[in-house]
Amino acid sequence: MSIIPRLSKSDLKALLLLLQVPRGVTELQRKVGSWRPIEYLNSLGLVKITETYGIKVVSLTPKGRRLAEAIKSIVGV
C-alpha cells in the first residue's frame, strides 16, 4: 500500500503543469505563486531540478509522473 503525501492546491497545480512538459523554475514559480511547492515536491522525490545552460529546469520523476497521472484521472483535467 502506497501512501499519498499531503498536497496543497499549489502542489497539485505544479504536478499537473509538469505532467505536460518540464518547466524552468522561474516559469513554474510564476504559475504556482512561490518556490515552496517546488521545494516540497523535490523533498518528496516527486520532481527533480537540473541545470541546463545555466537555467534550472524542474521535471517529474517516475514516482511524480505516476502520482500526477493518478491525480489527473481522478480530477478529470
Image: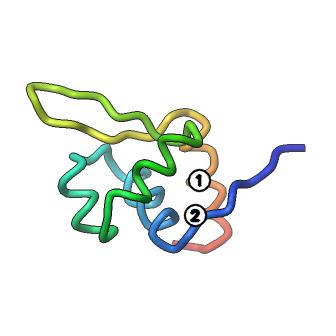
- State the residue at coordinates (59%, 42%): 44
Q: Secondary structure at mark 1?
A: helix
- State the residue at coordinates (43%, 51%): 19
Please indicate whether residue 42 sits to the left or right of residue 24 in the image: right
Q: Secondary structure at mark 2?
A: helix
Residue 45, placed above or below residue 27: above
- State the residue at coordinates (80%, 49%): 3
Please indicate whether residue 60 sits to the left or right of residue 33 in the image: right
Q: Considering the image in quadrants, where does the N terminus appear?
A: top right
Q: Nearer the viewer, residue 61 or 19?
A: 61
Image position, residue 52 (x, y; %): 17, 26
Query: Residues at badges 1 and 2 in contact (C-beta under 8 Å)?
Result: yes
Residue 42, placed above or below residue 51: below
Image position, residue 77 (x, y; %): 51, 72
Rounded to the nearest angstrom, the CA distance separating label 1 from label 2 is 5 Å
Q: Quadrant of residue 14?
A: bottom left
Q: Residues within 10 Å of mark 1 (few under 14, many from 20)?
A: some
Image position, residue 51 (x, y; %): 22, 28
- State the residue at coordinates (42%, 34%): 48
Please indicate whether residue 37 sits to the left or right of residue 26 in the image: right
Q: Residues within 10 Å of mark 2 (few under 14, many from 20)?
A: some
| Figure disc tally | 2
* Rendered image: mark on residue 69: 1
Amino acid at pointer 1: Glu
Amino acid at pointer 2: Lys
Residue annotated with mark 2: 72
Image position, residue 6 (x, y; %): 67, 62
Q: Residue furthest left?
A: 53
Please indicate whether residue 59 sits to the left or right of residue 5 in the image: left
* Rendered image: mark on residue 13: none
Residue 7, placed above or below residue 49: below
Residue 16, placed above or below residue 63: below
